[in-house]
């Protein structure tokens, strides 16, 4: 099934808008992984298995694997999630974007090599640079709009014909790039006002919302400002606050408990 349809089904079946970001940092792993040559895979698998019932998506971040030469672990992790937890879409966070011929390879990398259901993409090079992703109608394309980081406004707030660039991106995606109905937008949890503005522009287009947890985003403001009329529309993503909730023997249970707490907090405001 197509990514957006799978996502809507998972929102309904799980009652959760939580995404667990899988950002492995071996230096933060529990001691038992110190001599495990497959630690990156094993740690992420344990977290995914423990937290699965509380999530609508998982989101592995590619640099956290590639920096350690662990692309193979990433591939096996995505295959494991699909096999062990069918119905939970996997978003590969790679923030890709390049001229068409290279973007074609990035799309093949994300969807064919890694088997991801969706990928994050950077719109800065324009529509043709995202087209190879958009053309994969069964896959999701999660386009950066107003990112969660402190410097997000340096470029994204610059006025273009009287409106900030991130609003222009939202308009383009909703009105011109979403012909296959497979787009979503990244809007950071750290920007409640911008979440509300973008929601007004794009209707029911799903948002990936990183920035709760370690980056301090306000869950209540996120949900109230950006949910859709049916109380969904959000993939609220947290990585470090869940993955490293404990570095003791209870790391997987602690991660699951943190995911459950976030789910319940979000659901209070839906
Ligand atoms: O595309 C993303 O996932 C993303 C977009 C954004 O605007 N901000 C952002 O933090 N992210 C990613 O979301 C994750 C956030 O991690 P935590 O701050 O630990 O929850 C990291 O993997 C970031 O790369």
Image: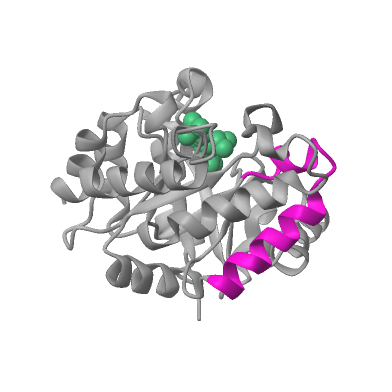
Residue 14, how many percent across, how many down?
A: 32, 66
**Residue 45 falls inside the magenta stretch:** no
What's the colour scheme?
one colour
Examine the rendered structure and indicate whether residue 239 appears above or below residue 72.
Answer: above
- Give the residues drawn in magenta, as a range: 61-84
What residue is shown at x 70% (from left), y 33% (from top)?
A: 26
Examine the rendered structure and indicate whether residue 119 appears above or below residue 164.
Answer: below
Residue sticking out furthest to the bottom: 1
The quarter holding residue 66 reads: top right
Residue 163, how many percent across, how many down?
A: 36, 31
The quarter holding residue 23 reads: top right
What residue is shown at x 57% (from left), y 53% (from top)?
A: 46
What residue is shown at x 78% (from left), y 65% (from top)?
A: 113
Number of labelled discs?
A: 0
Report the side of 230 relative to 10 (left or right). left
Kindly tell me whether residue 127 is visible in this rendering.
Answer: no
Report the side of 73 relative to 88 (left or right). right
Residue 218, how many percent across, how many down?
A: 27, 30
Is most of the magenta stretch helix, strand or loop? Answer: helix
Kindly tell me whether residue 46 is visible in this rendering.
Answer: yes
Q: Nearer the viewer, residue 248 or 118?
A: 248
Q: Nearer the viewer, residue 66 or 175?
A: 66
What residue is shown at x 53% (from left), y 50% (from top)?
A: 47
Residue 90, how many percent across, how many down?
A: 55, 61
**Residue 78 falls inside the magenta stretch:** yes
Examine the rendered structure and indicate whether residue 83 appears above or below residue 183.
Answer: below
Examine the rendered structure and indicate whether residue 179 appears above or below residue 237.
Answer: below
Report the side of 171 relative to 33 (left or right). left
């Amino acid at each position: 099934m197509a990514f957006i349809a799978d996502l809507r089904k998972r929102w309904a079946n799980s009652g959760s808008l939580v995404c667990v970001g899988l950002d492995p940092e071996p230096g933060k792993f529990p001691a038992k992984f110190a001599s495990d040559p497959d630690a990156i895979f094993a740690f992420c698998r344990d977290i995914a298995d423990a937290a699965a019932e509380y999530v609508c998506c998982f989101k592995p971040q590619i640099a956290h694997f590639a920096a350690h030469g662990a692309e193979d672990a990433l591939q096996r992790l995505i295959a494991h999630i699909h096999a062990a937890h069918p119905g939970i879409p996997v978003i590969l966070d790679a923030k890709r974007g390049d001229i068409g011929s290279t973007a074609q390879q990035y799309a093949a990398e994300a969807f064919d090599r890694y088997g991801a259901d969706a990928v994050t993409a950077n719109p800065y090079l324009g529509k043709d640079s995202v087209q190879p992703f958009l053309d994969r109608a069964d896959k999701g394309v999660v386009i950066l709009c107003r990112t969660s980081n402190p410097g997000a406004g340096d470029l994204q707030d610059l006025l273009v014909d009287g409106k900030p660039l991130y609003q222009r991106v939202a308009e383009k995606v909703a009105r011109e790039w979403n012909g296959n109905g497979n787009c979503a937008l990244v809007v950071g949890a750290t920007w409640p006002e911008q979440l509300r503005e973008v929601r007004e522009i794009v209707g029911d287009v799903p948002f990936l919302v990183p920035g709760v947890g370690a980056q301090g985003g306000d869950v209540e403001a996120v949900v109230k400002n950006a949910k859709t009329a049916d109380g969904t529309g959000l993939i609220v993503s947290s990585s470090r606050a869940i993955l490293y909730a404990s570095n003791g023997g209870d790391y997987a249970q602690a991660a699951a408990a943190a995911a459950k707490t976030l789910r319940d907090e979000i659901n209070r405001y839906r």
